[in-house]
Image (spheres, helix red, strand yellow):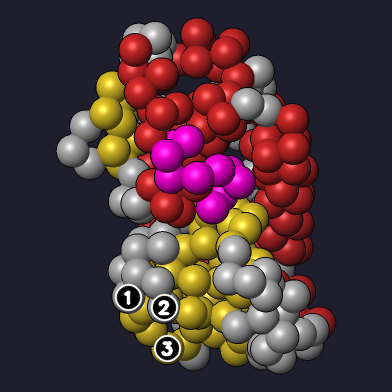
């Protein structure tokens, strides 16, 4: 639960007793392999998940099989909070890598959060951040070039991963294939490969075995018009 604690304390100071109340809730640890479904579109759900390890993706599937990835969910992220209103899921969630998940009944989760104002505030802020990420995704896919889209997503994921570790690192481990990046950015795998080549040739990134390294953060941010304020990580100076 360490990643989860760092996630929900990004905005609000939380008493450890409040967090312990969440940790003591009855739960089940579930595993999913890469590609497996976690939440099915149209499913009526009465539980929330906390990602303890691995990456997941929130997506929509078109009838012809095309997929649009809406956002990435990283260790410490909690979903799907729509279950607190007993709503049917309007999207699906898949494991992007092998993931470990903590499954908690939504009624127990809601009762605990509602009894702790600081917890409620932290999840409110988390929802604000997710909404901002989705707004930025609309702009990224709708108005930016292929190279700009990829550079912008790299910087976003880098900041989000750093928010969990607590330190901004130029190395970004990317445990997902290029096909997932393509579906997130509305591009083909060929476009992703070409854009990576361009970013490398311009001295902005270096591709490594585990992901990539950001070589010139300021130039990369200027190229894709990245302003990290939408992530609301000012408190962590990221």
Lower sequence index among marks 2 and 3: 3
Q: Residues within 10 Å of mark 2 (few under 14, many from 20)?
A: some
Give the Cα separation between the discs numbered 1 and 2: 6 Å
**Disc 3 crowd, CA 10 A, few/some/many (<14, 14-19, 20+):** few
Instruction: Say if the magenta span includes residue 54.
Output: no
Q: Nearer the viewer, residue 230 or 107?
A: 230
Residue 88: percent from the left, percent from the top?
76, 85
Residue at 67% x, 28% y is 144
Where is residue 165? Give x, y as percent.
Answer: 38, 42
The one nearer the camera, 219 or 164, is: 219
Q: Is residue 128 left or right of residue 98?
A: right
**Which residue was labeled with disc 2?**
36
Element type where label 2 sits in the image: loop
Q: Which residues are magenta?
A: 183-192
Q: Is there a contact, CB below 8 Å, between mark 1 and mark 2? A: yes
Q: Secondary structure at mark 1?
A: loop
Q: Tell me, yes or no, whether the two marked residues, 1 and 3, touch with CB atoms within 8 Å.
A: no
Which residue, given by chain and number where applicable, does mark 1 sit on?
A: 33
């Amino acid at each position: 639960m360490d990643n989860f604690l760092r996630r929900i304390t990004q905005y609000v100071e939380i008493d450890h007793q409040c967090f312990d109340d969440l940790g003591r809730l009855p739960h089940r640890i579930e595993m999913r392999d890469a590609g497996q479904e976690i939440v099915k579109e149209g499913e009526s759900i009465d539980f929330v998940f906390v990602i303890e390890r691995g990456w997941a993706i929130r997506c929509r599937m078109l009838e012809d099989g095309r997929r649009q990835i809406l956002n990435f969910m990283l260790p410490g992220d909690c979903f799907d909070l729509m279950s607190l209103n007993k709503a049917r899921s309007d999207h699906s969630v898949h494991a992007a890598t092998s993931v470990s998940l903590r499954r908690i009944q939504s009624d127990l989760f809601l009762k605990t959060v509602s009894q702790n104002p600081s917890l409620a505030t932290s999840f409110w802020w988390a929802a604000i951040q997710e909404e901002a990420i989705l707004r930025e995704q609309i702009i990224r896919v709708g108005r930016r070039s292929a190279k700009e889209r990829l550079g912008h997503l790299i910087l976003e994921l880098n900041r989000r991963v750093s928010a969990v570790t607590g330190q901004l690192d130029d190395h970004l481990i990317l445990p997902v294939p290029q096909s997932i990046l393509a579906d997130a950015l509305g591009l083909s795998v060929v476009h992703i490969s070409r854009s990576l080549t361009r970013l490398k040739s311009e001295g902005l990134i270096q591709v490594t075995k585990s992901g990539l390294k950001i070589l010139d953060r300021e130039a990369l941010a200027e190229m894709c018009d990245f302003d990290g304020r939408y992530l609301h990580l000012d408190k962590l100076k990221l």
